[in-house]
Every structure is written in structure tokens, then in C-alpha cells.
Image (tube, helix red, strand yellow):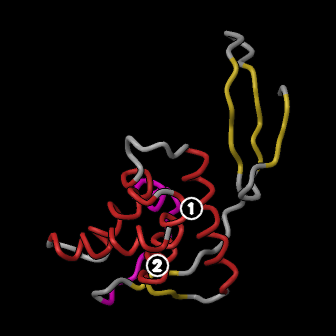
């Protein structure tokens, strides 16, 4: 092992070197805590999935100047807030609202992309209203 650092989500990043080929690589370790179950709109329940949330945020940020570290930080913040709630179940709407708020601060275009799907925006007038709200707020 070459070095160990703590990341923003409370995990550990270790730089390592392969004994066979000498190449360096990183491993990430984080505690697996019991996250609350998410209650979907249809009443079904599923476990909170860090990677699934990260993928959906990454999709909203494709081809935008948002780093992987920023996405990871946002997802880590959301996960930490869910843990702090100490509830066995949380509405998936709560998670979506956290993502919307985080993306609004992170990148406005990513926010609009996510909002199109999350809020079910399907007409130009509603999109324009959201964009006008963002412009007025900035």
C-alpha cells in the first residue's frame, strides 16, 4: 500500500500497487450502514441503492462541466441525510427532492434534465417556466 486518505463521504481511499505488474490503482472503502427502505409512488419498497442514485445523477450531468467527485459528493450527502433521519422507511419523493435541490446548486442544466423526468415535465411552457424561475433566482 502506498497511501491512505479519508474521502468526503466518510470512506477511505487507498492507493495500492500490484506486486506482479507494478501498476498502481485505488480502492475505496466505506461502511455499509442500514439505509432506510424507499417507498415508491406505487407503494412498492426497495432498498436505497447508492450506485443507482449515482447513475441517475451522472446521466443528468452528461457532457456538462460537473466532475465525478461533485456527483459522488452530492450522492454521499443525500445518503448521509437519509441515515441521519433514522427512519426504517422514507418516501422516494424525499430522495428525489434532495437530488433536485442538490442539482440546482451544482449545475442548472443538470437540474433541468433531472426535473424533466422526475417532475414529469412534458410541455414546453412548463420547461420555460422552470428556466425562467432559474434565471430570476440567479
Q: State the residue position of label 2.
A: 97
Write down the region rendered in magenta: 43-56
* Quarter the N terminus occupies: top right
Residue contact between numbered discs 2 and 1, judged by CB atoms under 8 Å: no
State the residue lying farthest toward the top: 21
Q: Secondary structure at mark 1?
A: helix
The image shows residue 136 at horizontal and vertical percentages of 43, 73
Q: CA distance from mark 2 to mark 1?
A: 13 Å
Quarter of the view holding residue 116: bottom left
Q: State the residue position of label 1.
A: 75
Is 51 placed left or right of 82 in the picture?
A: left
The residue depicted at 71 percent of the width and 58 percent of the height is 9
Q: Work out whether 87 lies above or below 80.
A: below
The image shows residue 12 at horizontal and vertical percentages of 77, 47
Per the image, is 127 magenta?
Answer: no
State the residue lying farthest toward the left: 123
The residue depicted at 75 percent of the width and 20 percent of the height is 17
Among the two numbered marks 2 and 1 on one chain, the one whose residue lies closer to the N terminus: 1
The residue depicted at 56 percent of the width and 80 percent of the height is 36
Q: Does the rendering let one see residue 78? A: yes
The image shows residue 78 at horizontal and vertical percentages of 59, 70
Is 92 placed left or right of 20 in the picture?
A: left
Amino acid at each position: 500500500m502506498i497511501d491512505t486518505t479519508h474521502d468526503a463521504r466518510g470512506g477511505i481511499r487507498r492507493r495500492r500497487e500490484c506486486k506482479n505488474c507494478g501498476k498502481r490503482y485505488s480502492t475505496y472503502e466505506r461502511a455499509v450502514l442500514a439505509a432506510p427502505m424507499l417507498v415508491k409512488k406505487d407503494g412498492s419498497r426497495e432498498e436505497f441503492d447508492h450506485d443507482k442514485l449515482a447513475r441517475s445523477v451522472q446521466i443528468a450531468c452528461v457532457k456538462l462541466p460537473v466532475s465525478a467527485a461533485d456527483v459522488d459528493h452530492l450522492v454521499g450527502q443525500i445518503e448521509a441525510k437519509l441515515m441521519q433521519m433514522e427512519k426504517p422507511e422514507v418516501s422516494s419523493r424525499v430522495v428525489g427532492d434532495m437530488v433536485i435541490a442538490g442539482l440546482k446548486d451544482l449545475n442548472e442544466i443538470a437540474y433541468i434534465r433531472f426535473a424533466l423526468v422526475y417532475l414529469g415535465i412534458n410541455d414546453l411552457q412548463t420547461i420555460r417556466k422552470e428556466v425562467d424561475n432559474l434565471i430570476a433566482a440567479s
